[in-house]
Amino acid sequence: MKFEDFHKALVRNPGAKIISLVFAVFLWLHVTAQQGENQSFRVPLMLTGIPDSLTIIHDVPQSIEVTVRGPRSSLLKLRLFGRSKATIDLSMVRRGIVNIPLSAGVLNLPEDFDPRNVSIDNPKTLVLNFEQVVTKLVPVKIAYRGKIPEDIIITSSPVVIPARVRIRGAASIVSGINFLTTQEIDIRNRRGKITEEVGLTMDGRGISVIPEKILIEMEIRKRATRVLSNIPPTLLLDDNEMFVDYFPKVVSVTIEGPEDIIKGIVSDDISVILNITTRKPGDYRLEPEVIVPQGVEKYYLDIEVFEITIAEAAGKRSGGSEKDGGAEDEGQGPENR
């Protein structure tokens, strides 16, 4: 056949040829779609009916791997539009380890899929460990972000509302929890009264908490330091006629606390007490008792101990000698007569 004859035959009746070509393509697609094949799917795993008194104490797979055999078109439809899931009813379980074989019966596949053409590959058996659920009241501790700046002071004790929360979970986990901490609170560059609601840190321990958030109230002030000098000690003694000498005669006290309180304190507001009420004559090294105004957080003395000497008054010593001498003279009187 000449090329011209071939070209004429090719271009003759183009519409019929195009229709034939399209029909052939659709026929090929239809035949191909009806061919059977295996495809794997990841199907979400749903656990239902777990009794309120039990809990699972380990991680559970979020999905299972399933292999389905069927027509390619049905498998494509299942992949694109299917909402398949594996549902396991656990309403009858008891405490301890439970082995649950997995089969096509846990899947909600369309009716046109034969269960015999479905296999569950991973995991084939679901192993679950159930433990008793318990509740417990534990205190709440505040967690601060970073190091608390040295130039601020938290006055008194922060108020936590509520101070104790109820936790609920597996007995083996709850028994090891003695307190919960708050999410970190940043108090840097903050002053005055603070009221803040914060959550609690669970650290993925599989417990529930009631309430999930607590309220914290605190007051933050600027820290100040002052040195008060030339403060004489106060002596406490039983006998005012005793002779007492001590060193040093005056001390310096460094005080720390909220700036507004520290600024208003003077030397007379501080007492340095030496208590020698039960001491007998002799030499002693004595730590003083220091009384500071309310609001002072810390105080320091420039010395640790006082050197103290206690002795009887000179008058008492001389009076005793005269008495003894008089008695002696009385005793010698009769002999001299």
Image (cartoon, helix red, strand yellow):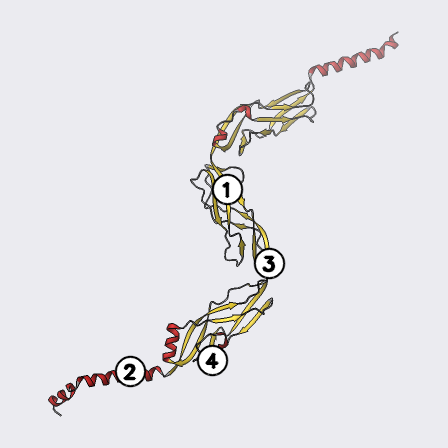
Q: In this view, does 325 lie to the left or right of 126?
A: right
Q: Is the C-beta separation of discs 1 and 3 under 8 Å? A: no
How many marks on residues?
4
Q: Which mark's residue is nearer the viewer, 1 or 2?
A: 2
**Residue at mark 4 to residue at mark 1: CA–CA distance:** 62 Å
Query: Label 2, on which residue?
Result: 26
Residue 72 image point, x, y percent: 37, 80
Q: What element carries label 1?
A: strand
Tell me the amino acid under the disc marked 2: Phe
Tell me the amino acid under the disc marked 1: Glu
Q: Which mark is residue 217?
A: 1
Closer to the camera, 26 or 129? Answer: 26
Q: What element carries label 2?
A: helix
Tell me the amino acid under the disc marked 4: Pro
Q: Earlier in the sequence, mark 3 or mark 4?
A: 4
Work out whether 96 lies above or below 183. below
Q: Earlier in the sequence, mark 3 or mark 2?
A: 2
Residue 163 image point, x, y percent: 56, 46
**Residue at mark 2 to residue at mark 4: CA–CA distance:** 30 Å
As drawn, the residue found furthest toward the bottom would be 1
Image point (62%, 26%), residue name: 274
Within-10-Å neighbours for mark 3: few <14, some 14–19, many 20+? some
Query: Label 4, on which residue?
Result: 115
Q: Which mark's residue is nearer the viewer, 3 or 2?
A: 2
Work out whether 59 lies above or below 223. below
Query: Label 3, on which residue?
Result: 134
